Amino acid sequence: MAVRLLDRRVGGITGDSGRAASATHTFLIIAIVLSVAYGTFFVLYDSQGLAPIIAASVLATALFAVGIMLVRTGHQLIGAVVAVTVGIAQVAFVATFLGWQSGIQLYLVPGGQLVFLVFTDKQRALRWAYLVVAVAAFFYCQLVVPVGGGGYTFGPTTLDVLFPVNAAVSLGLVYVLAAVSHYRAAAAREAADHAAERAEHLANTDALTGLANRRPVLEQLEALAGTGHYCVAIADLDHFKALNDQYGHACGDRVLAGVGATLANELRAGDAVGRWGGEEFIFILDGTTLTGAQSMMERMRVAVEELTLACGDHAHAVTMSVGVADAHAVPGDGALGVVLRRADAALYRAKQAGRNLVVAATPGPEPADRRRDA
């Protein structure tokens, strides 16, 4: 609960500043609760004799409340300065008044961890400055302040209760802050891993169709090169340039996205499809014979032919031509460049034969001029 509370958004601030603001906000709430609790105890115990530290508790509570308002209105740094400054000053004053036997100075121990939560990385100078102040205040209370204090002396029975209570609460705060630091580090690692995965996904994915782009396709083909147990198909949408010229690139993009989604849905497990560039798509059919690959691509061709894609007040029907090559049709065809050229040459023949066809590669040299009307 405490760990989650420290990571709440405060005042609409997010990121490093938001985490620092959340930590500051939560510390201020805890500080108010402790100040009110101790103030109430002091009032009930001896309101006259303990009047100075009762007044200090009231003043500190008011300043902590101001700090909360500062944080909630977006002034994280000022709120953090108020929180740490007032907290250290309050502990030092009460310890001076009551003496170190009261154990009040032990609250300065978690303050060393706290400064790393309430100040951001950009405020690291303040982190170290307040860390030095907190350590100095602790040694002052422990080494300079009299055992029994200079303003009030509790009886032995009260000290037997007060010191362990302060020690237990201080230790609990140390554990909570350690848990928060661990949680923050784990969350930062998770965020970094997610960002890396996201960047990798964006680098390997075509933004328009959601299919793989050339990079992962080439990596997969390079991994398969030389195995001789795969087929490659290259598909090209027919007359796509004319569609773009007549209806505009917005409609063209919708068509590409719709075709890409259809191809991905029709794909068999173990096969892969990617956008090869422009209106071309490439298929990697692992462990498939040329006959099987041709049948598979015929099913793909029919799925695209039956597709109707709405764009504004009209709809588009498109077809595609496909060239398929078998990596082990001829000795040496497993080489990446060769199988791609053979698939491309088969696609060229599909275009020449009237389009909307699936043509398998045949042995022999590729045409010298593979240019085709899209």
Image (cartoon, grey):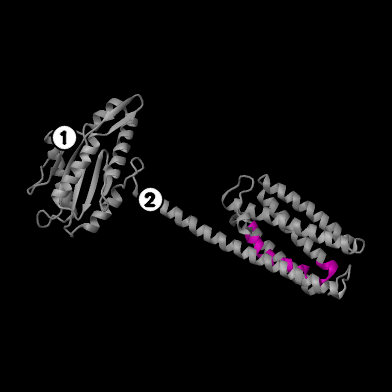
Question: At 10% from the left edge and 45% from the top edge, which residue is drawn?
Answer: 366
Task: Report the side of 214 relative to 115 (left or right).
Answer: left
Tell me if I can see residue 142 in this picture.
Answer: yes
Tag 1: amino acid: Arg
Task: Report the side of 73 relative to 285 (left or right).
Answer: right
Quickly name the residue at label 2.
201
Q: Main secondary structure of the magenta part?
A: helix
- Circle 1 SS class: loop
Tell me if I can see residue 343 in this picture.
Answer: no
Tag 2: amino acid: His
Question: At 69% from the left edge and 64% from the top edge, which residue is drawn?
Answer: 111
Above or below, 256 against 60 in this view is above
Label placed on residue 355 = 1
Question: At 68% from the left edge and 62% from the top edge, which residue is drawn?
Answer: 129
Query: Residue 48, how many percent across, how many down?
Result: 92, 61
What span is colored magenta in the figure?
95-118
Q: Is residue 339 magenta?
A: no
Task: Report the side of 151 relative to 198 (left or right).
Answer: right
Question: At 71% from the left edge and 54% from the top edge, which residue is drawn?
Answer: 29
